[in-house]
Amino acid sequence: MRIAIVGGGAAGFFGAIAAATCNRSAEIILFEATHQPLDKVRISGGGRCNVTHQCFDPVELIKNYPRGSRELLAPFKRFQPRDTVDWFEQHGVRLKTEPDGRMFPITDQSSTIVDCLLNVAETCGVQLRLGARIKNVESSMQNGEPRFELTLHDNSYQSCDRVLIATGSSPQGYRFAQSLGHTIIPCVPSLFTFKISDPRLDGLAGVSFENVSLTIIDSIGKKLRHPGPILITHWGLSGPAVLKLSAWGAKTLNRDTYHARLTVNFFPEQSREQLLQKLSVYRENNGKKQVHVDPPVALPRRYWRRIVHVSGVDVETTWTHVTRSAINAIVTELNAAQFDIVGKGIFKEEFVTCGGVSLKEIDFRTMQSRLCTGLYFAGEILDIDGITGGFNFQSAWTTGWIAGENMAGK
């Protein structure tokens, strides 16, 4: 049996290794168009490689996938983050867990993961062909068995019995899938930051907030909400809460050309009335103190001074002389500040798209196409995407492993 793997990323390598491990007699050929395999692995996590996430319950794990959660439940019951950790440890790579659950190699070097995959693939007998750009993939049936003909850009040909397409978000991969009968869901960016031009944020790049609640209201009035930390940047807002909200709102925001109204609640665990009460008590006990000096709530001082200013309070005003309307304005800035999103920025550490091969056309028990026998898919080419934190790599490991085992005849 000859198996072709198209795409030398995380899913492609894991699929190739799984196939070679499952069927030692199979000929496994991995085609990578560039001369730099596993490039996304190499640059991910700021060069550290966020391999997976310490979420070992498949039911909880799927909640981190805006698209593909339902389809991934059964695959995660077969190969989940615990299996990923065990696999790498069996091959000499120990992972560590950070406080937020993200898992990295203990070396903090993505090259550790890259070298491991390259070495295991070589040991298993996977033939790695770099700079091998596929021009076309054709399928046929011969004596009731699938056959594939791959045409390379140098016009050479490669015949095989099974094909795994794991080309990530490459347009070429979508073209192959479409030519073999598959539907491609239009791709749009996921995991991005918000461009916001607002005087409340000017000059405050680097100021962060530990736990806020973000709400987007789109052009048709639909609300999307997500809690978590945020960070002021030179162009607007970033941080885990922004990235997660961008993932769930990827298609909505794309439809609205990345323009939306964003509401930020800096104190989601306190009501407006509780905040008003807190400011009133502080006012009674600190009447002679200037309002702008110190925040009466847990807020970065620089940002407190900014919202005091935009609420119309003069820098010399003391708490005794601050008006009720000004206090109301300040509280609104604390629990319902509104910003206009005017565009998106790229989250450079982990650029992800949503969209790809329609999930309805894939058998997730095997990762085989429901339309073309012998054709398999894994990784980001599918209409699956996860939030930041190692979840996108985990879906690549899982779908690649299941595809590899089943292609090889398990």
Image (cartoon, rainbow, N blue to C red):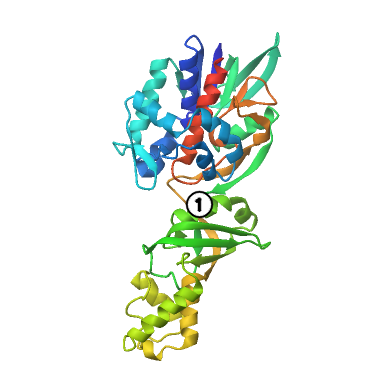
Q: Is residue 33 visible?
A: no
Q: Dot 1 surroundings within 10 Å: few (below 14), some, or many (20 or more)?
A: many
Residue 404 placement (x, y as % from top left)? 52, 22
**Residue located at (49% from left, 15% from top):** 22
Q: Quadrant of residue 217?
A: bottom right
87 or 358: nearer the viewer: 87
Of the 4 image quadrants, the one containing the C terminus is top right
Q: Is residue 51 left or right of residue 395?
A: left
Q: Is residue 399 left or right of residue 390?
A: right
**Residue located at (55% from left, 42% from top):** 385
> Taking 350 as reference, is 221 above or below it?
below
Q: Residue furthest left?
A: 107
Q: Is residue 245 left or right of residue 390?
A: right
Residue 36 placement (x, y as % from top left)? 42, 31
**Residue located at (38% from left, 48% from top):** 100
> Taking 45 as reference, is 395 above or below it?
above
Of the 4 image quadrants, the one containing the N terminus is top right
> Taking 19 as reference, is 195 above or below it?
below
14 or 69: nearer the viewer: 69
| Total labels drawn | 1
Residue 48 placement (x, y as % from top left)? 35, 40
Residue type indicated by callout 1:
Lys
283 or 2: nearer the viewer: 283
Q: Residue furthest bottom?
A: 321
Q: Which residue is mark 1?
A: 244
Circle 1: element type: helix
